[in-house]
Image: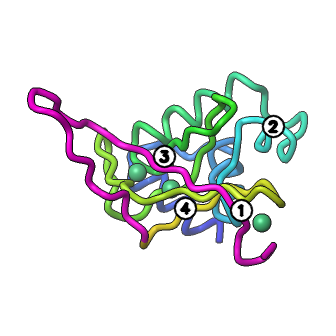
Amino acid sequence: MSDSIRSILKKNNLSVTDSRLHILELFYNAKGALAHSDIEKQTGEEIDRVTIYRTLQTFEEKGIIHTIPTADNSVKYALCKDRCEEGHHHDNHVHFICDHCGKTICLDDVLVPEVKLPKGFEPHQSNMVVTGSCNICK
Ligand SMILES: [Zn+2]
Ligand SMILES: [Zn+2]
Ligand SMILES: [Zn+2]
């Protein structure tokens, strides 16, 4: 496990540090998206807030994780698929938030439908969040 995580860091020209390894491992073990506070809880005293924040920012820039907007204006993070690269994300899938267990899940195979915009508007990114009960809670 930690070998493949190590190779992801190397592939992205990131030096391998304990905190990067640890945070990336959390994403691989997570069955859904993680908020900053989830990571903080799971790493405990081991990694400080600023390091978590910077690590998430670096991972996002490198195309390793993507952000998901949530209803309460906070942000969650989830692993990207192989298509993402540095400075260029292709995460055009729908996100699902379960009302019961509170999990945010990437529906990788469900693409955000294209929205027809009025003349003169050019889309850059669109997000779609669906709420309901997930396949475990239903
Ligand atoms: Zn991405
Ligand atoms: Zn659920
Ligand atoms: Zn996603």
* Range covered by the magenta-colored residues: 110-138
The residue positioned 83% from the left and 60% from the top of the image is: 100
Q: Is residue 20 above or below residue 138?
A: above
Q: Which residue, given by chain and number where applicable, does mark 4 sit on?
A: 106
Q: Which mark is residue 40?
A: 2
Q: Residues within 10 Å of mark 3 (few under 14, many from 20)?
A: many
Foreground mark, 4 or 3, reads 4
Foreground mark, 2 or 3, reads 3
Pointer 2 with pointer 3, Cβ within 8 A: no
The answer to which quarter of the image holds residue 36 is top right
Identity of the amino acid at label 2? Glu
CA gap between label 4 and label 3 equals 10 Å
Q: Is residue 137 above or below residue 59?
A: below
Tag 2's secondary structure?
helix
Tag 3's secondary structure?
strand
Q: Which residue, given by chain and number where applicable, does mark 3 sit on?
A: 66
Q: Residues within 10 Å of mark 1 (few under 14, many from 20)?
A: few
Nearest to N terminus: mark 4 or mark 2? 2
Q: Which mark is residue 30?
A: 1
- Magenta includes 34? no
Foreground mark, 4 or 2, reads 4
Q: Residue 55 at x, y = what percent?
A: 59, 35
CA gap between label 4 and label 1 equals 12 Å
Nearest to N terminus: mark 2 or mark 1? 1
Q: Does mark 3's beta carbon lie closer than 8 Å to ligand 1?
A: yes
